């Protein structure tokens, strides 16, 4: 069997299921059926979810199994959360990674105080 495609190969809009069939007796249902959000994930995202669940949500175990760095695993988790239509907690708070590194370099060079760095990192 093939994986169910979730996006139209022509316009990339979401596909709907219009026919369901029993593989045992051949009974079929026709209509318009929607897929749950989980089925709209890419094959790579579904694989990540499977590893995540098998690892009981422990990112260090996911990291070891997939051979990825912690930030990459964290990023993939956030990608799945967003693909399911949810907001990533704290994603809009603070500053982006480039700005964060700049702030930390200024702190290390003693160009700013730790209090200033904290305020800047919190996006204030």
Image: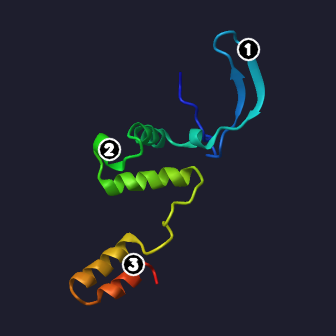
Q: x%, y% of residue 116?
A: 35, 88
**Residue pointed to by mark 3:** 121
User: Sequence order check: which comes first, mark 3 or mark 2?
Assistant: 2
Residue visible at 60% across and 39% down in the picture: 6
Classify 10 Å Cα crowding around label 3: few (below 14), some (14-19), many (20 and above).
some
**Residue pointed to by mark 1:** 27
User: Sequence order check: which comes first, mark 1 or mark 2?
Assistant: 1
Q: x%, y% of residue 84?
A: 57, 49
Viewed as shown, does residue 104 lie left or right of 21? left
Residue 61 is tagged as 2
In the image, residue 80 above or below residue 36: below
How many numbered tags mark residues here?
3
Residue visible at 36% across and 49% down in the picture: 59
Provide the secondary structure element on which disc 1 rests: loop
In the image, residue 5 above or below residue 107: above
The residue lying toward the viewer, choosing from 54 and 98, is 54
Q: x%, y% of residue 93?
A: 48, 72
Which residue reaches farthest right? 31
Q: x%, y% of residue 24?
A: 64, 10
């Amino acid at each position: 069997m093939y994986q169910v495609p979730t996006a139209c190969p022509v316009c990339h809009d979401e596909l709907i299921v219009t026919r369901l069939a029993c593989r045992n007796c051949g009974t079929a249902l026709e209509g318009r059926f929607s897929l749950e959000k989980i089925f709209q994930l890419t094959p790579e995202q579904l694989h990540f979810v499977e590893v995540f669940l098998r690892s009981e949500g422990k990112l260090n175990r996911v990291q070891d199994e997939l051979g990825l760095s912690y930030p990459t695993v964290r990023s993939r988790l956030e990608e799945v959360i967003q693909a399911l239509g949810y907001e990533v907690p704290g994603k809009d708070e603070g500053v982006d990674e480039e700005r964060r590194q700049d702030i930390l370099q200024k702190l290390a060079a003693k160009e700013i105080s730790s209090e200033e760095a904290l305020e800047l990192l919190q996006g204030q």
